[in-house]
Amino acid sequence: MAETRTAASAPASVVVALRGVCKAYNVGTRIETEVLQGIDLTVRAGEFCAVVGPSGSGKSTLLNIVGLLDRPTSGTMEVCGEHTTALNDGALTRLRGHNIGFVFQYHHLIGAFSAVENVMLPMLGAEGFPSAAMRSRAEMLLASVGLTEWQDNLASNLSGGQQQRVAVARALAMNPALVLADEPTGNLDTKSADEVFSLLRQFNVEHGTTVLFVTHNAALAERCDKTIEVIDGRVTAGVGAAT
Amino acid sequence: MRETWLPFEWIVAMRFLREGRLQTLFIVAGVAIGVAVIVFMSALMAGLQSNFIRRVLSAQAHIQLLPPREVTRALRPDDTPGAPLPFAIVQPPLQRLKSIDQWQSIVLQIRAMPEVLVVAPVAAGSALVVRGSVNRAITIAGIEPTLYYRIVALEEKIVRGHARLTGTDIVIGSELARDLGVDVGDKLRVATGGVGGDASAVTLTVIGIFDLGNKGANQRSTFVALHTAQSVLGLPGGVSSIDVTVRDVYASERVAGRITATTGVEADSWIRTNADFFAAVSAQTTANTAIRFFVGLSVAFGIASVLAVVVVQKSREIGILRAMGISQAQIRRLFLLQGGLLGLGGAVVGSAIGAGALVVWQQTARAADGTSLFPLTLDPKLFGIALVLATVTGLVAAFAPARRAARLDPVVAIRG
């Protein structure tokens, strides 16, 4: 696994390109709800973007679509160099597994595994069998988030901030091109929130990992390279807004 | 990961089962009880049936070839089919004792069949045994001891004396010995009508007294050497039946049919001659199979319902795994494995419980004389089958929950 991608300041390729992406639920029924309405969005490699907007504006739906967990109702999209509209579930799963890392508002660690095992899981799923290389990478990632001495503790025995840091390490396990963080600091105190943000920023700077960071915290949003503001299912111009 | 030799699906499946250990414990206990019942019942029924069959077949051959029955052929005034018979009453003929034609070559033909174990010629008929003023009707069976004792283990049933028959020896049943007041070494006079009514009599020495476990048989059955019976019964060089044992007692009817087709001599299997008994055994087998099927079905539903609950409980984890790039096929395998492991775990415990119950049963269920009612064998094949069937049942039961887990929408699953 390559440790460094494109440097943040270098001319960068497009990691996410959405054109006219719409997402509606209950299509064809009286309660049809259009959550995303013609999103055009381009995110380049190495960018650290804040995604902001009021609750219910479609930020999480946007992240789910970019993260290939959900499909748009219409529009085209390209993620990590692949046109994903026509890909089947297997291909989307492979693309997601190898190129995209997720950090959620709630850590969503798997309680039956220790911290280091949680970080190993994406690698284990991709390769089939555990290996020493997997474990050393997981340990290295946990060391970089400051959890070496907690690595063998069950995830359920860690504090909220520690769990979220493990979740960050897990998101980075496959050295993804893109990390999608859906309000990862929403449940944390200020200190822990700052630690998690700093970790993601650190990986963004050191490894060129592209990050979409959903937050309601204006102070954190200001520390991002640019801000994507989503209001009523549309991307509106923000600071350094996406094209 | 401690389980470095295991693939991803095994590791996650085992961790999930271990995490919900109380739930796992309950379903393994449920499966174990089901498997224990199946193992215990199967061994008990198999022991019971083999004991029944052993008792039935301990005193008779699997197949017996008999000479053709004599029939009366009415004489017609001419050969015109359908022409009226001159006599309205046709009397059935008397069934005289007679030999099977060419029995030596028939014996060779039967011995050449791969399904056949032993072929023994027998000359048997009715006789009268006389001692002083007492006489009894008996069946005298002339046998070749080395062959016949492999069909009916007479030597094992001897209660006094021995069964090594020579020219003037006779082995009689315990009831007949009591009726006649004879013991080993005493002489008996045996008389027959002979073929064509020519009476003949011979004096024989009692060398052994047997107990076949049947009062009637102990009163009537006697055994002498083949050539002695041929002489007494007036069947010089002939045999009245050919007794056969086969490798698979349940294949007797099929082998009997083959023997009849090959030799042209009517062959009756023990299945036909003990039709009521065999029907009872078949009914018992069917009932046992039905019970095992329904126990297996309840085990399957137990596993399926627990896994359905696990899918709901673990839906968020499934969503996270899917977000990490775990494929639908991997999720499916993960849940199938859990089903298989629950089945296997339950089968291992259940087999141990079943085996323990069988040992306890054998030690506690005793006949009036203190001996075990019938021997039970802990057949490793039975346990192997139980393990395989329970594992397959677990896999099949897990199919629907596994498919449901694999099809979970990761977004919905993560949202919970």
Image (cartoon, coloured by chain):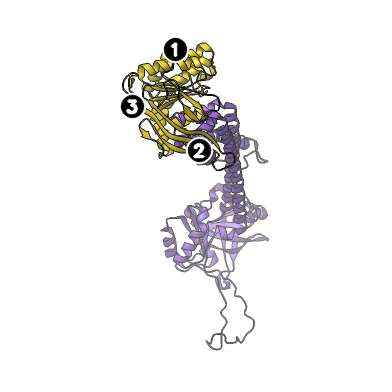
Chain colours: A yellow, B purple
A137 over A95 or under it: above or below: above
Examine the rendering and report whether any part of residue B354 can be seen: no
Q: Chain of mark 3?
A: A
Query: Could you say where residue B349 lies in the image, as x and y percent from the top left?
Result: 56, 32
Q: Is residue B350 left or right of residue A50?
A: right
Q: For the residue marked with disc 2, what is the amino acid? A: Arg
Secondary structure of the residue carrying numbered label 1? loop
Q: Which residue is mark 2?
A: B407
Q: Quadrant of the N terminus of chain B?
A: top left
Query: Could you say where residue A57 lies in the image, as x and y percent from the top left?
Result: 53, 28
Q: Which residue is mark 1?
A: A146
Number of residues whose C-alpha sits closer than 10 Å to that of mark 2, classed few (under 14), some (14–19) or many (20 or more): some
**First reached walking from the N terminus: tag 1 or tag 3:** 3
**Residue sticking out furthest to the left:** A11
Say yes or no: labels 2 and 1 on the same chain. no
Examine the rendering and report whether any part of residue B99 can be seen: yes
Estimate the spatial distance between the alpha carbons at disc 3 and disc 2, rounded to whole Å.
34 Å
Instruction: Please tell me the numbered disc located at residue A13.
Output: 3
Number of residues whose C-alpha sits closer than 10 Å to that of mark 3, classed few (under 14), some (14–19) or many (20 or more): few
Query: A37 or B58, which lies in front?
Result: A37
Q: For the residue marked with disc 3, what is the amino acid? A: Ser
Query: B232 or A63, which lies in front?
Result: A63
